[in-house]
Image: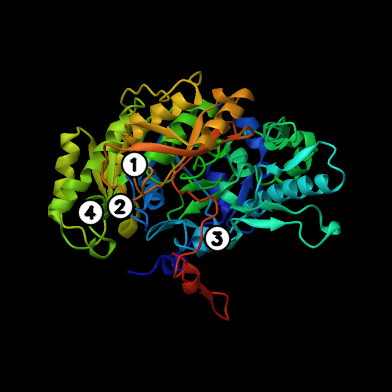
């Protein structure tokens, strides 16, 4: 089979003008970024404001292997299959981050014959959203240090600056740094560090803002530091919010692209559900629901991360009511959760599959807690045997969950027709969507609900630092916000080595921070890094360009 990028190079896609026109979007409502990419303007939102919304389908997954399980590929293929069945569908996806593209992933635009196009542009600079977010974040950081240097009228304690600088690249050497060295002219030395851009609060704010006015308000509400007397300093106190909003004036508008088969896709907002809330922007999702009768969207990593945050944070903020949820699983991921090493995942192992399927059973049960119909999609790999597939079918039957084998990677929409039909049937079933917890619970009570109901923990332990942070946050009024738990994607627990469906463990919270602009509190567990590093052999080693400008190595 051809590589992902070879398939992309061979594709004949339509000018984005034609994709927009088919959706009823006028010339005045679109801003072109070349021939095959565009942004959709606020005027389109205004025109469609009173139009009824379509049905929302969320795609999530089991706990993955380190290589990922093809959730984006399945989302794209499902969208293509629904279109092939004659449905008016729009796909809502997250934008790739350059860090993982050049680090471990090598790309994030789907794969095989289920890709969004133009694949190279999307995986690289796209329409510049990540760069705008990086600039806005770093403008704020520059203004904080400049304020301290210029007399510090706000009385900011340099030891308690909360905002880190950001860049859209994995670089462990920048996790912890010292700024301001070199004498008086260079400001006051202090400890600092970098986050990857998609882990920044500015990214979360972009994803959760309803419009430019709301964006500016959220930016102004960012808690950026504490004074010497312990009182809070917000971004609006520094008068940085207006300029930051200016840098984001184009980035706030969703990006319109297409799949290999011409299905419209809105790509907007950042990934990283293990650190942030990890899903497509509210603006893109809502617009997709206005433009199509069905919107297929994804949430990062397993349902214990992306889906939980999608339901408890995004849907609550945006007033969204999903109609069904698809859980992507792979035979190899279930064997991995059953104790098989990465090197041996291609070998048939029914015993390990049975054992690892406890992970799938947990995700099915968890998604039902939100009152939604569940469909399991097995993203088929060439090494999967019929005996293994039959085993998973039986397990799904035992859980009374609908099931379909997805072969969209190899066959495009044709490989997703069974899944699409099951999803259509599920979306017509009665649903009673509701978040997992009410907002009037305390921070600890919310964390306790998620830990017990979604992770299967016996309880939660807090470090002294976390306890102190919670007290400060609740004193500032942050106790009534949703919680965004930063946790490993490889386990239902906070320990990546506890695979399958772990029991008898307690969740350990090491710190808590307030993202007042985004509108949630971040709860840090385990060893989650907000600035990942590159692996021993980065994907970048395989990415190249020839004298004709032809790119290779993206996948």
Which quarter of the rendered picture does the C terminus lie within? bottom left
Where disc 2 sits, the SS reads helix
- As measured in the structure, the alpha-carbon distance from the residue carrying label 4 to the one carrying label 3 is 29 Å
Q: Is residue 474 left or right of residue 60?
A: right
Image coords of residue 355 (percent x, y):
18, 47
Q: Mark 2 = which residue?
A: 414
Question: Mark 3 or mark 2: which comes first in sequence?
Answer: 3
Q: Nearer the viewer, mark 4 or mark 2?
A: 4
Q: Secondary structure at mark 3?
A: helix
Q: Give the class, few, some or many, for how many residues have Cα within 10 Å of label 1's Cα (few <14, many ≥20).
A: many
Furthest residue in direction top, as rendered: 440
Q: Residues within 10 Å of mark 2 (few under 14, many from 20)?
A: some
Of callouts 3 and 1, which one flags the residue occurring earlier in the amino acid sequence?
A: 3
Q: First in sequence: mark 4 or mark 3?
A: 3
Above or below, 223 relative to 496: above
Dot 1 falls on a residue whose secondary structure is loop
Q: Position of residue 373 (x, y in %)?
A: 31, 30
Q: Earlier in the sequence, mark 4 or mark 1?
A: 4
Disc 1: which residue: 492
Residue at horizontal 55%, vertical 29%? 470
Where does label 3 land, which residue?
Answer: 172
Residue 37: quarter of image: bottom right
Residue at the spot x=58%, y=24% of the render?
474
- Residue underneath mark 4: 339
Marks 3/2: CA distance? 42 Å
Q: Secondary structure at mark 4?
A: loop
Quarter of the picture holding the N terminus: bottom left
The mark closer to the camera, 1 or 2, is 1
- Residue contact at pointers 3 and 1, CB within 8 angstroms: no
Residues 83 and 379: in front is 379
What separation in Å lies between label 4 and label 1 (alpha carbons)? Answer: 15 Å
- Choose the circle earlier in sequence order: 4 or 2: 4
């Amino acid at each position: 089979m051809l590589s992902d990028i070879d398939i992309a190079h061979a594709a004949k896609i339509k000018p984005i003008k034609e994709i927009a026109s088919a959706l009823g979007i006028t010339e005045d409502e679109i801003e072109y970024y070349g021939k095959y990419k565009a942004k959709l303007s606020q005027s389109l939102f205004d025109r469609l404001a009173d139009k009824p919304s379509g049905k929302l389908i969320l795609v999530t997954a089991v706990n993955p292997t380190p290589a990922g399980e093809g959730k984006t590929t399945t989302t794209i293929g499902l969208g293509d299959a629904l279109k092939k069945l004659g449905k008016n569908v729009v796909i809502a996806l997250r934008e790739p981050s350059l860090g993982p593209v050049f680090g471990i992933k090598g790309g994030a635009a789907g794969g095989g014959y289920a890709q969004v196009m133009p694949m190279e542009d999307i995986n690289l600079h796209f329409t510049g959203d990540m760069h705008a977010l990086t600039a806005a974040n770093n403008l704020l950081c520059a203004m904080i240090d400049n304020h301290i240097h210029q007399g510090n009228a706000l009385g900011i304690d340099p030891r308690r600056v909360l905002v880190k600088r950001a860049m859209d690249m994995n670089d462990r050497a920048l996790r912890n740094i010292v700024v301001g060295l070199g004498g008086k002219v260079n400001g006051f030395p202090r400890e600092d560090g970098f986050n990857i851009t998609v882990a920044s609060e500015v990214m979360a704010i972009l994803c959760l803002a309803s419009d430019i006015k709301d964006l500016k308000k959220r930016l102004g509400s960012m808690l950026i530091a504490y004074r010497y007397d312990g009182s809070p300093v917000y971004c609006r106190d520094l008068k940085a919010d207006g300029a930051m909003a200016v840098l984001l004036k184009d980035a706030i508008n969703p990006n319109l692209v297409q799949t290999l088969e011409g299905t419209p896709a809105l790509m907007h907002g950042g990934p990283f559900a293990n650190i942030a809330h990890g899903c497509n922007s509210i603006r893109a999702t809502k617009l997709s629901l206005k433009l199509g009768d069905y919107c297929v969207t994804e949430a990062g990593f397993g349902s214990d991360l992306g889906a939980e945050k999608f339901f408890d944070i995004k849907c609550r903020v945006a007033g969204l009511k999903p109609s069904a949820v698809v859980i992507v699983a792979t035979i190899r991921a279930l064997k991995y959760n059953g104790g098989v090493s990465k090197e041996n995942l291609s070998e048939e192992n029914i015993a390990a599959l049975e054992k690892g399927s406890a992970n799938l059973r947990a995700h099915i049960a968890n998604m039902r807690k939100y009152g939604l119909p569940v469909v399991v999609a097995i993203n088929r790999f060439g090494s999967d045997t019929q005996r293994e597939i039959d085993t998973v079918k039986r397990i799904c039957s035992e859980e009374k969950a609908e099931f379909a084998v997805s072969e969209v990677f190899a066959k495009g929409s044709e490989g997703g027709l069974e899944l699409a039909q099951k999803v259509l049937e599920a979306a017509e079933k009665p649903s009673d969507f509701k978040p997992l917890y009410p907002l009037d619970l305390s921070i600890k009570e919310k964390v306790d609900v998620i830990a017990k109901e979604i992770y299967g923990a016996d309880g939660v332990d807090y470090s002294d630092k976390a306890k102190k942070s919670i007290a400060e946050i609740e004193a500032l009024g942050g106790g009534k916000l949703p919680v965004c738990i930063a946790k490993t994607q490889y386990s239902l627990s906070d320990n990546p080595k506890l695979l399958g469906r772990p029991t008898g463990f307690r969740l350990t919270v090491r710190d808590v921070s307030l993202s007042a602009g985004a509108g949630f509190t971040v709860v840090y567990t385990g060893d989650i890094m907000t600035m990942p590093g590159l692996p021993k052999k980065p994907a970048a080693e395989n990415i190249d360009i020839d004298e004709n400008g032809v790119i290779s190595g993206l996948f």
